[in-house]
Image: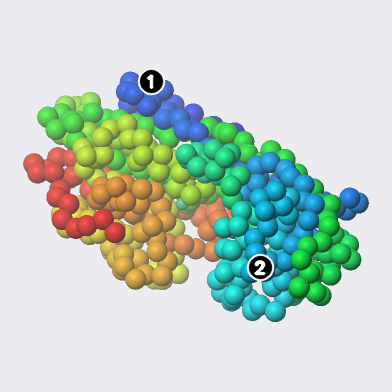
Amino acid sequence: MGRDTGKKGQKMAAEYLRDRFKDIGVPPLSRAGVDGGYFQAYELIESRKGSIAVRSRNHELRWPQEILYFSEHMTEGLVLDWLIPLKATKPLDSILVARAGVVIDARNLELGPSGFRGLSEPLERAKSAGYKAVFIILQEEAKQQMDGLVHADGTSMRLPSPEDGAQARNGATQVFYLTANGLSKLAGRRGTRLLLKPKARRVKAGISIEVTSREKRIQAENVLAYIEGSDLREEVVVVTAHYDHIGVENGVVYNGADDDGSGTVALLEIAQAFTAAKSVGRGPRRSILVMPVSGEEKGLLGSRYYSDNPVFPLEQTVSNLNIDMIGRVDSAHSASPPYVYIIGSDRLSSDLHAVNEAANSAHTRIVLDYTFNAEDDPNRFYYRSDHYNFARKGVPSIFFFSGVHEDYHQPGDDVEKIRFDLLESRARLVFHTAWLLANRNERIRTDKPIR
Ligand SMILES: [Zn+2]
């Protein structure tokens, strides 16, 4: 079912992973923050877009065709009795501010790459004056250009934050974009008079704004397989991959075999290898936390939650090895020997970089491609998968990756296209690197600043 975070598919995948870890012989974990078994549950807020209805007495403007907005700041409805043009004249009294919407005529402004030139100043002025609603009037053409930025039936997710208090958000100004035609639907001829006569002080309007509940609290899980080490067990090496994907869209299941089914099954193999070693008395000295995380596709949320609420102290976390898509071949390597992209290995720790290279030359001998490790690489992959939530806290991290391909985030990311021979050798490299990190005498040093 595409393993969409917080949805049935993700829950099924979490249960599957838990059952596999049990079968492998990983014991349940009893530690604060874990449910006594294998799950670290965390809360998310799912927001639905298009939750603000704007209407005049006899017409409701349709979102996003007739009225467009992006971030939705309003949590409560309100009635606007007045529309005013934003001028530098003396400010209105607070009662009027609370009942007035500001109209900014942006029809002559040029749409640049970062918005309309010349709009930010009046917008800031309206915000600091305390207006709750600003209506920005666009040319039809500009409005159409902006329509392309909206995904009409989209939802988004985030972790709860202290700013979630309704008070904080009610203080914000809601910005609406519409055309002159839209404005006349909303406020009749009086509304368009504001555009014709910018010296008009204010016009009467009867606009009601309603907000339907758009937020749902949902729960998601990270799955934790903890293999306790021996003499250095207080230190832990964390191995991650995200097991969520993008779910079902328009009835089509997005299987995400490479993204990140490949990394997830690699984690099962790695957990099994460490457990097997331990069961014959040859287990790792440091502890290993194999952790399939969720919420990655929604903004690296599961790993962010873990790194903010770590089950094992981050100061004792030696490294994070993160796998995200290691089952395919990208166009740059169609004729290449077996390879993997290594991203981040030297960003915080020269030792980590050396250990990974040593593991490869001793065991896997695949091509380590550092293309995406360049600090000025425009793809910025270093910031785009779960390891970054560890790196931002100073934990040396590597992102193992085989590159994007034509099925990336498409329904065709299916298991038939996985190159299992390559998936195996890449997974072995991650295992051997984790093994060396867990067993060397000295913990790897961090010798570079966080960036
Ligand atoms: Zn991914």
Q: Residue at x 37, y 27 (%)?
A: 33
Quadrant containing the N terminus in the rendered view? top right
Q: Residue at x 38, y 26 (%)?
A: 34
> Which of pointers 1 and 2 lies earlier in the amino acid sequence?
1
Tell me the element at label 2: loop
- Please state which amino acid type lies under the numbered disc 1: Gly
Depth check: give the residue in front, 27 or 336.
Answer: 27
Tell me the element at label 1: loop
> Residue 367 location in percent, x, y?
28, 64
Q: Which residue is mark 2?
A: 89
Q: Is residue 445 visible?
A: yes
- Please state which amino acid type lies under the numbered disc 2: Thr
Quadrant containing the C terminus in the rendered view? bottom left
In-image side of 259 versus 382 (left or right) = right
Depth check: give the residue in front, 15 or 305.
Answer: 305
> Residue 114 location in percent, x, y?
55, 71
> Residue 72 location in percent, x, y?
63, 50
